[in-house]
Image (cartoon, helix red, strand yellow):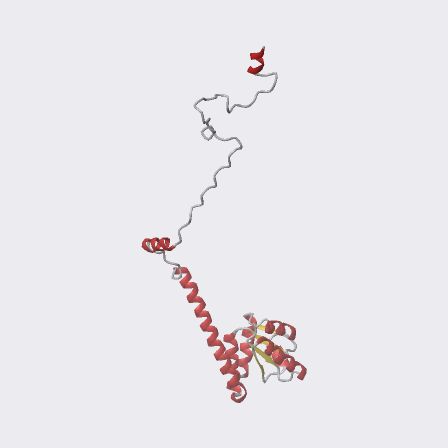
């Protein structure tokens, strides 16, 4: 049974779903990409406190497994591994179930919590797939409104008042029709003509 857990860890490493080392584990945990943090049985207390802090920051679960740093290192191709993180929820739940089979008292609760997380993740994936399918099939496309409804909407809109153009400004000189006419019957055809300057025009010619 111990080999089953180590085999799953090796499978996660080959599939790119396992992060090894304290600093890389901290990075994936703070990015909320870690699903299960694994601590070797002979890891120091300082390492345990840091792993617990990483788990709190990343809202993930951490466990101390019944494997030494040398055993984890041999499985993962290193001399020693004190900390690693599983980033796939399915593999994390499978590892927790293998650990629960070894020690139900210590790991049953961890397996149940990871099962719940895996179920929620599957539901979110299914909702996302359904949404993408609805978008592709045009289910969410807005239907065109009937012509009658469009006409009613146009009637409800307030009428736009026409803006009257302001009258053009008049010049200082009145129009021909508005000029004052003489009161007597005599009509002076030069009444509204401009005065002629001295030395020019018909006045000079008349005196000459």
172 up-or-down from 42: above or below: above
In-front residue for pair 205/143:
205
Residue 71: x and y, percent? 61, 81
Name the residue rendered at 63%, 74% in the picture. 26
Instruction: Count the marks.
Output: 0
Q: Which image quarter: residue 194? A: top right
Name the residue rendered at 32%, 54% in the picture. 148
Q: Which image quarter: residue 66? A: bottom right
Q: Residue furthest front?
A: 184
113 up-or-down from 150: above or below: below
Residue 173: x and y, percent? 52, 30
Residue 68: x and y, percent? 62, 83
Task: Describe residue 163's horizontal placement relative to residue 16 as left or right.
Answer: left
In-front residue for pair 132/190:
190
Q: Residue furthest bottom?
A: 105
The quadrant the C terminus occupies is: top right
In-front residue for pair 161/119:
161
Name the residue rendered at 53%, 86% in the picture. 102
111 up-or-down from 194: above or below: below
Task: Describe residue 28's horizontal placement relative to residue 123 as left or right.
Answer: right
Q: Is residue 97 visible?
A: no
In-front residue for pair 150/181:
181
Residue 206: x and y, percent? 56, 12
Q: Is residue 202 visible?
A: yes
């Amino acid at each position: 049974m111990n080999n089953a857990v180590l085999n799953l860890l090796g499978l996660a490493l080959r599939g790119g779903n396992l992060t090894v080392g304290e600093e890389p584990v901290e990075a994936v945990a703070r990015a909320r990409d870690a699903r299960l943090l694994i601590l070797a049985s002979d890891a120091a207390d300082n390492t345990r406190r840091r792993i617990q802090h990483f788990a709190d920051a990343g809202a993930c679960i951490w466990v101390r497994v019944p494997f030494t740093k040398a055993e984890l290192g041999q499985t993962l191709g290193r001399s020693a591994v004190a900390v690693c993180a599983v980033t796939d929820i399915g593999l994390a739940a499978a590892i927790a179930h293998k650990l629960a089979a070894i020690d139900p008292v210590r790991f049953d609760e961890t397996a149940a919590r990871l099962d719940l997380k895996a179920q929620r993740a599957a539901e979110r994936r299914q909702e996302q797939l359904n949404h993408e399918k609805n978008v592709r099939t045009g289910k969410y496309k807005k239907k065109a409104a009937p012509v009658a409804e469009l006409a009613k909407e146009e009637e409800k809109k307030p009428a736009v008042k026409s803006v009257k153009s302001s009258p053009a400004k008049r010049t200082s000189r009145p129009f021909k029709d508005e000029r004052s006419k003489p009161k007597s019957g005599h009509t002076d055809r030069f009444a509204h003509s401009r005065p002629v300057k001295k030395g020019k025009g018909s006045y000079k010619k008349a005196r000459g």
